[in-house]
Image (cartoon, grey):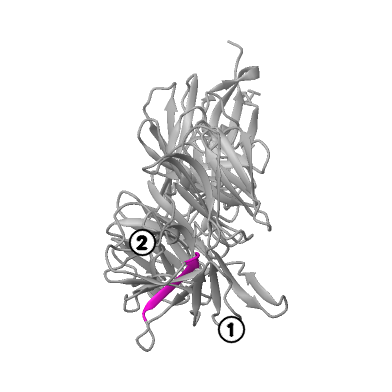
Amino acid sequence: MRGLPYIGYKRTSRLTTDTFGGWREGLRIGDGEWSFTENLTSSAWPMLAARAPRGLVRTLTDPGGLLEKDALALVDNGTLYYNGLPTGLIGLSPGEKQLVSMGAYLCIWPDKKYFNTADFTDYGNMEASYSSSGSVQFSLCRSDGTEYESVTRSDTEPTRGSCEVWIDSSGNVSVAMEWSTSAGGWVQIPTVFTKLRFTSHGEIPALFAESDGVHIEGADFEEANGEKTLYAVGGAEGGEADFVVIVGLLDESMTQQSGSVTIERTIPPLDFVCECQNRLWGCYYGNDGERNLNEIYCCALGDFKNWRQYRGLSTDAWTASVGSDGQWTGAVNYLGRPVFFKENRIHLVTPSAAGAHQVDELVCRGVQKGSHKSLQVVNETLFYKSRVDICAWQGGFPETASAALGELRYYDAVAGAFGQCYYVSMRAEDGNWHLFVYDIRRGLWLREDDLHTLCFARVDDELYAIDADSGKLWALRGTCGVPEAEVNWQAVSGVQYYETADCKYLSRYNVKLRLDEGASVAVYLEYDSSGDWVQAGAIENSGLRTVLLPVRPRRCDHMRMKLVGTGGVKIFSITRVLEVGSDE
């Protein structure tokens, strides 16, 4: 009987990757990691998935910034918009803004303007200035502005009841005295106040308020000039002129007929501003026109208009000089403390209920110049872009969070946060922009696309971003706006070798995936670093189902795989089928 032909059996084995990593730069990367990604998300981890379509909310003409409050606030073409509607705050200067929230108020730098989101009629300038155009009257008064009925100035003590206030001029310095029944004689008035009356037709009470810290100049009464606190501000009622009350001893009432008296409430120049513990905090490095400054400031408690209010109280404004060199590069409220950055320093302020705030200095990687908008808190960890990496900081020394991004340098980082993900848009040293997403739970970096983001803002369950190139306002999670037509995605593997140990060679890929309706995916292979991508398989789906896409590579030394697709996809696993070859 003739025997049947013998058919050799090829032994096979399988290596399956069913847990996928993220982006990783390097000559050798781990199994399931990718040397390049586009429009992928870790939300379906351990599967690999395409991100959801974004929503186009609107296109802006000249965007200036975003801020998250109860509703979205944005600046466009010099106008502040809140909850999608224009406000009365118009005429803002062109360029990027710092928008800072303090309670119901929204403060805008460098314009130094404010808007009350609880009362749309309350908006305007934080600073104020008034110059008199007529006569100014000076008189002695009480702290509330009530004038004394009779004031006598003499070297000798007047009789009781002859006057309310006696200005004792017997010494080198005049002293204000009043009669004390309990003491049985004239006693010194602890604090003497002077009233300045103007004909401002209601302008002064509209500009200034009690307790404002102001600078006054041009007064013939010399003691009225300089840094002052307003103890009372009065309006024009019944024909009475507008007035302010300051501390000062006036020997006798007087009227100034010539010149102009100027009252100003100013805010120091500020590079960066943040809110913390019901105060605004800021920093400035440079020359203010008079001297070089390297300082940290805060406004009076609960009063963002007053940065020069010094009354000796714990609620006063505050200023501190620092000795570290270099420009400020960012500021943030982190865990209830104002934190200020330079490229090689972190300055931490400890607010004090007594007003004795303290500044501590940490010499370490700070925020890169131009990347002040990279500061974001995710799960109580502060992330920011330094000169060399993305740092994660929890109050000690910063740690690197971006080792997966390799040695390529990035600049001008802008970041946002949603859930447990850190979104950062950065310009690479080759000039190209990248939007990366870091999932801190899984330690995964993924690149979405080349979105050049001006700023981010999270409101409720959506993260908004402005495209700095087109002015488009995007809802990145797609919960509102007009959805994108389609999402194109791709993932490029690292180098994989055709032959492995024990003379095993790669005979086939099996890609298990699920496609949404209308979605498609194609597999490309690059052999021996040729730079040419050869299509090795493709599939389209008209319904929601799980498919197996087999891919057969040709013989080579090494290869890379690229998955390219459109629409929704979830990749469950990639299996490499290995066969045993000969030793020769």
Per the image, is 248 magenta? Answer: yes
Considering only vertical position in the picture, is 411 above or below 179? above
Q: Which residue is mark 2?
A: 220
Q: Earlier in the sequence, mark 1 or mark 2?
A: 1
Residue 504 x %, y %: 61, 22
What span is colored magenta in the figure?
A: 241-250
The image quarter containing residue 63 is bottom left
Residue 569 x %, y %: 49, 52
Label 1 – label 2 distance at C-alpha:
31 Å
| Helix, strand or loop status at disc 1 | loop
Which amino acid lies under the numbered mark 2 shown in the image of this protein?
A: Asp
Q: Residue at x 48, y 76 (%)?
A: 118
Mark 2, Cα crowd under 10 Å, few <14 / some 14-19 / many 20+, is some
Q: Is there any visible trace of residue 20 in the rendered image?
A: no
> Which corner quadrant holds the N terminus?
top right
List the single residue furthest toward the bottom: 238
Q: Is there any visible trace of residue 334 in the rendered image?
A: yes
Of residues 495 and 393, the one drawn nearer to the viewer in this rendering: 393
Q: Residue at x 60, y 75 (%)?
A: 178
Relative to 42, 464 lies left or right = left
Mark in front: 1 vs 2: 1
| Helix, strand or loop status at disc 2 | loop
Considering only vertical position in the picture, is 345 above or below 11? below
> Which corner quadrant holds the C terminus?
top right
